[in-house]
Image: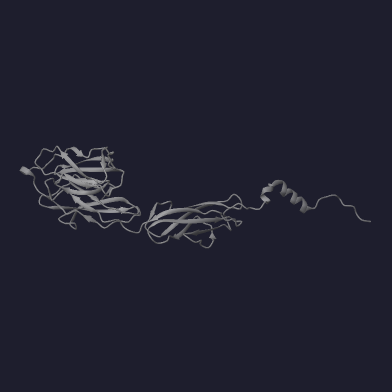
Amino acid sequence: MTKPKSGKMSKGLVFFLFLFSVIPAKSFAADKTPPSGSIKINNNSSYTSSTNVTLNLSASDKGSGMGKGAKMRFANSSWSSPENYKTSKSWSLTSGDGTKTVYAKFCDAKGNWMKSASSDTIILDTSKPAQPSVSDSGSTTSSTSSLYASWSASDTTSGIAEYQYQLTQDSSAGTVIVSWTSAGTSASVTKTSLSLTSGKSYYFGVKAKNGAGLWSDIGYSDGISISSGSGGSSDTTIPNISKVSPEDKSFVYQGKSQTLSITTGDSDSYQNYYQFSIDGSIKQSWSTKSSYSWNTSSYSLKKYTLKFEAKDDGGSSSKESKIFLIKEPVSPPD
C-alpha cells in the first residue's frame, strides 16, 4: 500500500519562497537602463598647449552598477575600442590649434551602453604669443628713483594671461636691477623705490604668457639714460592731464580721421611725453607729440576705450575715454 504524502514542502521550495518574500520583485527584473556619465578634459581647463591630455571621468548606474564588466570608449571623430571603466584616461587630441571636442560613452556591468555620448571641449594652442613691443618714457630722465614702461603683445588663440617684466642696467643683457616680476595683465608699470645711477642706461624686458601657459620671446625697450634735470634738480611733479579729445561718452563717425589729443597742466620746464592706446593696443608709443590721428575706416561699429597717457621725469598720469564708433548720419535731400 502506498504511503500517503505528509503535506510538507521540500526544502528547495521553502528557500525559494523565503527569497521571494524578502527580495523586491524588481530585483529579479533584467537591467536594461544604461548608465549616465560625464567627461572633463584636464580637470575642465579652458586651454592646453599639448595634444596629450587627461580625461577625467564619472559614471553611475542604479541597476547593475559600474563595477566588474563596466566599459567605456572615446572618440575625437571615430570610436575607440571598449575598455574597462575607470575614472581617468590619457588621451591624444587631433593636431592643429583650435577648439577640440572629445566624446565618451559608458556601459554598465550588464552591457547597456549610453545612447547619447557625453562630451567636453578644450582649446589647443601650441603657438607662443607675439614678442611684446616695449616702450619707455624717452631717451633720458632725471629721476633716479622711478622708471615707467608700457608694452603690447597679442595671442590670437588663447589671449594674454600674464605679463612679466625685468629691469637691467647698461644693456638688455646687463646687470639685473629688478628681477622678473608679474604685472598681471596690465600693459604698463611705474617702478618706484629704485636707486638709479646718473650716466647709466636702463632697459625694460617684457615677456607674455598666453592662456595655454606658453611664454613669448622677450621684448626690450631701447633704453633710457639717467641725467640731471634743469638746474641739476629732479622733477617731482607728475603731468596733470586737464583735457583729452575725444571726451568720454563721445560719438565718433566711422570712416573719418579722428584726432586724439592731450592737454596737460604741467607748468615745470621738463619735457612731457605722450602715448595713445585703443582697446589696450598702443597706437602711438611715447613721443613728444601730444596728438595722434586715428583712421577709423577699418574699425567696426562698437564701443572703444581710448587711453591717453602723459609723463615726464616726475612720473606719469593717464585718462580713459569710452567712445562709440557710429555711422555718419545721411542728411535728407532738400
Q: In the rendered image, which quarter contains the N terminus?
A: bottom right
Across and down, in percent, residue 300 comes to: 30, 47
Number of numbered labels in the structure image: 0
Residue 310, image x, y percentages: 17, 43
In the rendered view, how is the structure colored?
one colour
Residue 12 appears in the rendering: yes
Residue in view at x 50 percent, y 59 percent: 74
Rendered image quadrant of residue 146: top left
Determine the residue positioned at 54% across, 53% down. 116
Q: Quadrant of residue 321?
A: top left
Furthest-left residue in this view: 231
* Left or right, residue 118 beside residue 248: right
Q: Is residue 40 visible?
A: no
Q: Is residue 258 left or right of residue 107?
A: left
In the image, 300 versus 196, the foreground residue is: 300
> Which residue is painted at 48% across and 53% down in the image?
119
Outermost front residue = 334
Residue 245 percent across, percent down from the top left: 20, 40
Q: Quadrant of residue 193?
A: top left
Q: Residue furthest right?
A: 1
| Foreground residue among 237 and 12 | 237
Q: Nearer the viewer, residue 120 or 323?
A: 323
The picture places residue 171, in percent across and down from the top left corner, at 16, 57
Task: For the C terminus, give its image quadrant.
Answer: top left
| Residue at x-position 30% and y-position 50% | 162
